[in-house]
């Protein structure tokens, strides 16, 4: 593993330090920092292949981490000067402490220079692959993600697996199986990278499979040894989310009993992916009841002996044949076969590819992704293949080495999460930025760090080094993870380099000591038993907790742990997303360096007041919590970029300044609020979620018209009584939505003018949600003219009419249609030639709906969900819709545990 990217990160820190004019009061201190920066710049090119000498890498990492500690410790000790606290600036004692801190810091910089001098003398022996520069962000944005529309094609990676797909489907739905057949275990066996998970996923998403098995569950067992209970609880959520959310059993045995009872009620299909050890399967197998109704369990594993005792049939994934390998490569590399100038050229290139990849789908996908980015000649492509061959055909390592240096730490950071853990893309981007992996200095022109993070993500997707596990219906990635085969290689290496440390055990031995002081900590089971020695806490910058238990022990543990590290003051990232009610110390405000505080879905009821006084805070996320108030001092945070809330009201003072704010989600403004007069100070927003009084809309409209960078907008209009208010798309002076070229997602809750005028909506809208709109004229003809619309959601009382028609030619790009609680709707008609791309449709609680005509014309439809609909209506639709559409019927009732 090379160390070039670590050098780059340190250079960015030093450069940011030099740009801060208030940091150094003496020029000689600044000069020493400048010399260290210059030295690193000269050495950067020489470190690109230092990975050939692991001892040298360790020495280099030690020196760089030493310098990083010096910088962060210095900045922590002098927060008042750096943030303009004039009350202390000229106090003699404070000034003396400040000068002494500068002096100690520069001594450490001198020591760092001496340490890297050894590496400087080593540079003549360093040689290796030349790394390309970071791909142009502009080019990446134009190119986009190759897979953007591939979420529509559930079998996009099925090349070479067609026979196994047929075999596995045949075993799941045999022609002559008795309806009382015992539960059967089927193993899918193959070596690493041979396509086991892809095969299981293709079958799992088949319409026939969805129709045959009422219950379907997918779990990954690769980390089962560390989180057995969590895996079972994840299964419970997929079987019955309402029961799972109502009460979490305190004991694993209780959880197993509940899960077994729920599974026994209907025919089920369980996919247990990536079972590596016999003891893992032994603990899981007892959960699955023998339902005697044809239920099936699929286990994917590299080791056939793991489930040999329980598995009767086995499906083997093998290396692809030459022609299969070639077809998969051409598909992933985006190279048409007729692009080769002559047969000899094709034969040579094809032979090289087949030899290099050896028939392993993962290797083919990686090398195809790499070459898809290179708009180059045949000779240049061959050069890439030769370079990969020089590494002994290690495609994984070669794909990593070919990454631009700036993107490498972003890729490796994915290894901090558990294997197969689905990371929200939103969360990943914000963490990359907060961790300094995407720096402000890497931006140019109008690009923001968020833009750069998106460009890095797109490059990793196009190279097939990050897998999108869930897509939004408009084609935007929602959840992602590192492919399992890559995770097994790179997560341990990243930890060995000191990028992060994972706490996932209840006991430790001397052999568990990390190679470097822990800087980024991820805990999977909570933080109990985490060692408190200096090596483990003294230099901690980031803490990411991934425990999802509801019981109070993790919350108490986190509080105690934070009390240990708060006085150290180095923490920049505190991510507790999804942790149930963590205990936050009142002294949290001492974390002067904290830039990211993630508390989403924690169900917290309050925050320490000092949180809003953190000087470097850039992201505060309290969405999906019970927090109803925040101190008004939050608006004084001039570095704040993202504020996620749940409809919090700030009526006690106007907004002083928020010039960097990109996200303002969940702000509630009441009538005559002083906030109304100061909204125009926020001008850079990309995401806005706002609740307001309908009588105060004109100043809000005048403000929104200035927000030309808006990408997502949610407006809720309410009256004093709490009833729905009105939303006017235009005022006497402005038309606030038509000029918003970048606005793609619009949610309007409130009574709209009648009828809806498409000319008043954003021209490039992809997602539109209407709720409480009170429309009496069928809006579908008008809305169907929106040329780019992917998702349309008409929620409660958005339409009050009895008939609705989707007209010929309307909604040319619509993928998802949701109709909820349209209580007066009786007839829904779909003309031939309407909604020609529709994939998913849901009708919920439209109790008076009696006729659904023309849906057969929509040949692209894959899934129709009927929730809380009349049983006769649901039965009639199922009989008329055809076998190519999966019809899901839900009848949601209040859970007894919640009553």
Image: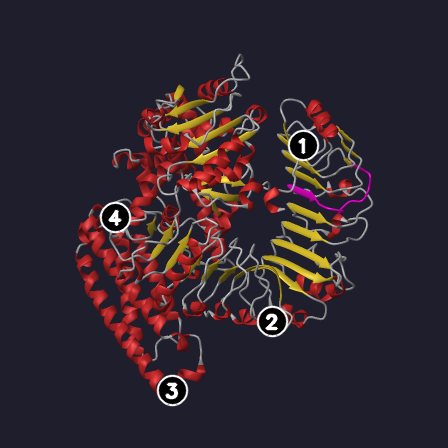
Distance (Cα) linking label 1 and label 4: 52 Å
Earlier sequence position, callout 2 versus callout 3: 3
Q: Nearer the viewer, mark 1 or mark 2?
A: 2
Q: Is residue 242 left or right of residue 127?
A: right
Cβ atoms under marks 4 and 2 closer than 8 Å: no
Q: Is residue 91 magenta?
A: no
Distance (Cα) linking label 2 and label 3: 31 Å
Which label belongs to residue 91?
Answer: 3
| SS category of the residue bearing label 1 | loop
Q: Residue 754 at what x, y percent from top left?
A: 81, 50
Q: Which residues are magenta?
A: 790-804
Earlier sequence position, callout 1 versus callout 2: 2
From this view, report whether residue 75 is shown above or below residue 282: below
Circle 2 residue:
655
Earlier sequence position, callout 1 versus callout 4: 4
Quadrant of res 443:
bottom left
| SS category of the residue bearing label 2 | loop
Cβ atoms under marks 1 and 3 closer than 8 Å: no
Q: Nearer the viewer, residue 586 or 122?
A: 586
Q: How is the image coloured?
A: secondary structure
Q: Nearer the viewer, mark 4 or mark 3?
A: 3
Quadrant of res 19:
bottom left
Q: Is residue 757 left or right of residue 193?
A: right
The residue at the far top in this view is 176
Circle 4 residue:
49
Q: Nearer the viewer, mark 4 or mark 2?
A: 2
| SS category of the residue bearing label 4 | loop
């Amino acid at each position: 593993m090379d160390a070039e990217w670590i050098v780059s990160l340190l250079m960015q820190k030093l450069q940011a330090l030099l740009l801060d004019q208030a940091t150094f009061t003496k020029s000689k201190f600044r000069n020493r920092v400048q010399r260290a920066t210059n030295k690193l710049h000269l050495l950067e090119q020489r470190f690109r292949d230092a990975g050939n000498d692991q001892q040298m890498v360790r020495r280099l990492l030690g020196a760089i981490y030493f310098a990083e500690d010096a910088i962060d410790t210095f900045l922590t000790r002098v927060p008042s000067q750096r943030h303009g606290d004039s009350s202390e600036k000229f106090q003699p004692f404070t000034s003396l402490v400040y000068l002494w801190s500068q002096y100690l810091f520069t001594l450490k910089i001198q020591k760092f220079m001496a340490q890297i001098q050894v590496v400087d003398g080593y540079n003549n022996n360093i040689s290796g692959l030349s790394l390309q520069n970071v791909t142009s962000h502009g080019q990446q944005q134009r190119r986009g993600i190759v897979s953007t529309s591939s979420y529509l094609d559930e079998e996009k990676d099925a090349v070479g697996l067609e026979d196994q797909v047929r075999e596995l489907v045949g075993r799941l739905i045999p022609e002559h199986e008795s309806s009382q057949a015992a539960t059967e275990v089927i193993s899918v066996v193959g070596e690493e990278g041979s396509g086991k998970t892809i095969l299981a996923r293709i079958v799992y998403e088949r319409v026939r499979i969805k129709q045959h098995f009422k219950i379907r569950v997918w779990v990954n067992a690769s980390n089962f040894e560390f989180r057995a209970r969590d895996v079972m609880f994840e299964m419970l959520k997929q079987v019955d989310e309402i029961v799972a959310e109502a009460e979490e059993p305190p004991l694993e045995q209780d959880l197993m009993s509940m899960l077994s009872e729920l599974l026994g009620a209907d025919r089920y299909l369980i996919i247990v992916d990536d079972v590596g050890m016999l003891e893992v399967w032994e603990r899981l197998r007892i959960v699955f009841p023998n339902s005697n109704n044809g239920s099936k369990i699929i286990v994917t594993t590299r080791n056939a002996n793991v489930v040999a005792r329980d598995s009767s049939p086995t499906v083997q994934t093998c290396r692809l044949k030459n022609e299969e390998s070639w077809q998969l490569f051409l598909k992933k590399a985006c190279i048409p076969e007729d692009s080769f100038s002559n047969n000899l050229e094709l034969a040579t290139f094809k032979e090289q590819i087949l030899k290099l990849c050896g028939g392993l789908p993962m290797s083919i996908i990686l090398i195809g992704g790499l070459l898809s980015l290179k708009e180059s000649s045949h000779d240049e492509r061959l050069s890439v293949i030769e370079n990969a061959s020089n590494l002994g055909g290690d495609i994984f390592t070669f794909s990593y080495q070919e990454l631009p240096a700036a993107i490498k730490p972003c890729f490796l950071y994915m290894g901090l999460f558990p294997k197969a853990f689905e990371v929200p893309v939103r969360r990943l981007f914000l963490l990359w930025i907060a961790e300094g992996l995407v720096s402000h200095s890497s931006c140019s022109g109008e690009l923001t760090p968020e833009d750069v993070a998106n460009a890095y993500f797109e490059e990793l997707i196009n190279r097939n080094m990050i897998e999108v596990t869930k897509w939004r219906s408009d084609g935007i990635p929602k959840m992602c993870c590192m492919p399992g085969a890559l995770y097994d290689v790179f997560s341990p290496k990243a930890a060995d380099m000191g990028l992060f440390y994972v706490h996932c055990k209840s006991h430790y031995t001397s052999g568990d000591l990390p190679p470097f002081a822990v800087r980024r900590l991820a805990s999977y089971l909570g933080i109990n038993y985490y060692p408190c020695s200096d090596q483990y806490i003294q230099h901690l910058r980031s803490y990411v907790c991934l425990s999802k238990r509801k019981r109070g022990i993790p919350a108490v543990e986190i509080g105690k742990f934070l009390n240990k590290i708060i006085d150290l003051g180095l923490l920049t990232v505190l991510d507790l997303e999804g942790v149930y009610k963590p205990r936050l110390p009142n002294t949290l405000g001492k974390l002067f360096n904290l830039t990211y505080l993630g508390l989403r879905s924690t169900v917290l009821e309050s925050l320490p007041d000092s949180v809003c006084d953190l000087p470097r805070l850039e992201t505060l996320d309290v969405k999906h919590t019970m927090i109803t108030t925040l101190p008004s001092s939050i608006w004084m945070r001039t570095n704040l970029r993202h504020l996620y809330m749940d409809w919090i009201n700030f009526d006690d003072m106007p907004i002083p300044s928020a010039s960097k704010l990109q996200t303002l989600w969940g702000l509630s403004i009441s009538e005559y609020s002083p906030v109304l007069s100061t909204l125009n100070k926020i001008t850079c927003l990309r995401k806005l979620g706002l609740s307001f009084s309908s009588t105060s809309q004109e100043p809000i409209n005048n403000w929104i018209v200035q927000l030309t960078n808006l990408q997502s907008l949610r407006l809720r209009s309410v009256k004093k009584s709490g009833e729905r208010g009105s939303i006017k798309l235009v005022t006497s002076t402005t038309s606030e939505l038509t000029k918003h070229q970048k606005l793609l997602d619009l949610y309007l809750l409130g009574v709209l003018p009648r009828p809806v005028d498409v000319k008043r909506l954003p021209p490039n809208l992809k997602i539109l949600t209407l709720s409480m709109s009170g429309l009496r004229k069928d809006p579908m003809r008008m809305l169907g003219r929106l040329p780019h619309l992917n998702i349309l959601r008409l929620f409660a009382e958005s339409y009050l009419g009895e008939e609705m028609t989707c007209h010929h030619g309307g909604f040319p790009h619509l993928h998802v249609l949701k109709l909820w609680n349209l209580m007066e709707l009786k007839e829904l008609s779909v003309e031939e030639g309407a909604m020609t791309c529709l994939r998913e449709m849901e009708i919920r609680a439209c109790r008076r709906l009696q006729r659904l005509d023309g849906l057969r014309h929509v040949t692209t439809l894959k899934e129709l969900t009927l929730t809380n609909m009349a049983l006769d209506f649901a039965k009639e639709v199922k009989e008329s819709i055809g076998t190519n559409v999966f019809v899901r019927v839900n009848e949601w009732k209040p859970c007894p545990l919640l009553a």
